[in-house]
Image (cartoon, rainbow, N blue to C red):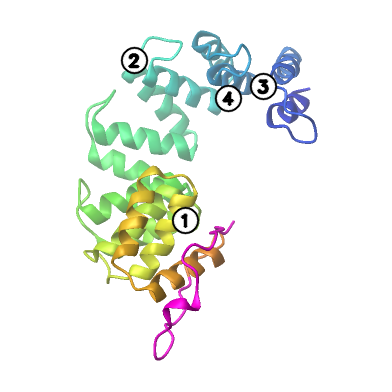
Amino acid sequence: MTAIGRLFAKGLGVAKDEERAAQWLQKGADAGDVTAFVDLGNLYAQGSVDGKPNGERAAQMYRKAAEAGVIAGWQGLGWMHLNGKGVKKDEAAAFAWYLKAAEAGDPPSQVMAARLYLAGRGTPKNVTEGAAWLMRAANAGDPDGQMLLGRLYLWGEPLGRDDVKGLHWLTQSAIAGNPEGQYWLAKAYREGKHVAVDPVRAYAWMSLAKARGYALAAEEAKGLSFDMSQDQVRRGIEAAQQWRIGADIVVAVPPVGGMAVGQFNLNAPFAPGR
């Protein structure tokens, strides 16, 4: 029953129908599948059941999952308390739920616990603990954890600057398809403060971040192109088009003797890799 509800929620093999999804998920929960409470909580939080978000109902669902020991329920309650949705805003409670999920091995919760430690929200500021949780999430392959760890190493606060580690983690996040990781890696290649300037590689990563909806990337990509030759822009576009998740950008070797202006179209449609 829970499986049927998830199919309706995602529109997999059936027409997407979130009200029917909620009905099937409730049946699954009533039959003893406590993981269905998380799906129900998500639907209520998103406003998919009654046409508008129902924070109180979502919190009830997450709490039932949490009481049954479902990690995603702990994570859901952390989010609700952090944002004051359906429950009173309580950063200490949010931290406690995120830390509980982090200790159980949930990488996204490890990232959130790290953020709260580093910012001193809901818990005393503790850079050592925050960095340790970020490292655990990054090593587990969490792209957000990799992105944040890379940024902290490159820009030197509060972990201390380490360009090698910073570029490593930003690259891991970028090749995993994380648009924010792609954006910050592109910035590093554009600025040349942490790695040799590479406008083609910067343009390719920035184009991918833009294509994936990262808002800051659109203006950055435009600004990048003003400082590049047409051949560099062309090679950046080609590198982005050929990129696939799990791989680094591959930039073509520049042609010997240059290229005529009319040999390519800068306005050709851009189709990012998958």
Whether residues under marks 1 and 3 lie with C-beta atoms below 8 angstroms apart, the answer is no
> Which circle marks residue 208 in the picture?
1
Furthest-bottom residue in view? 257
Q: Which mark is residue 70?
A: 4
Q: Do the residues labelled 1 and 2 touch (CB within 8 Å)?
A: no
Q: Please name the residue shown 69% across and 27% down the image.
A: 9
* Distance CA(mark 3)–CA(mark 4): 10 Å
* Mark positioned earlier in the residue sequence (3 or 4): 3
Callout 3: SS: helix
Q: Do the residues labelled 2 and 4 touch (CB within 8 Å)?
A: no
Residue at point 78%, 26% (across, down):
4
Residue behind mark 2: 90
Against 215, residue 9 (above or below) is above
Query: Mark 1 packing: few (<14 Cα in 10 Å), some, or many (20+)?
Result: many
Q: Is mark 1 on a helix, strand or loop?
A: helix
- Circle 3/circle 2 CB separation < 8 Å: no
Label 4, label 1: how far apart the Cα atoms are:
35 Å
Is 78 left or right of 192, judged from the image as shown? Answer: right
Q: Quick check: can you spot residue 168? A: yes
Sequence order check: which comes first, mark 1 or mark 2?
2
Residue at image mark 3? 36
Residue 217 image offset from top left, x and y in percent = 37, 50
Q: Dividing the image into 4 quarters, which one contains the N terminus?
A: top right
Query: Which one is nearer the viewer's eye here, 87 or 222?
Result: 222
Magenta: main secondary structure equals: loop
Instruction: Please say if 7 is above or below 66.
Output: below
| Residue 7 drawn above or below residue 153 | above
> 274 above or below 126?
below
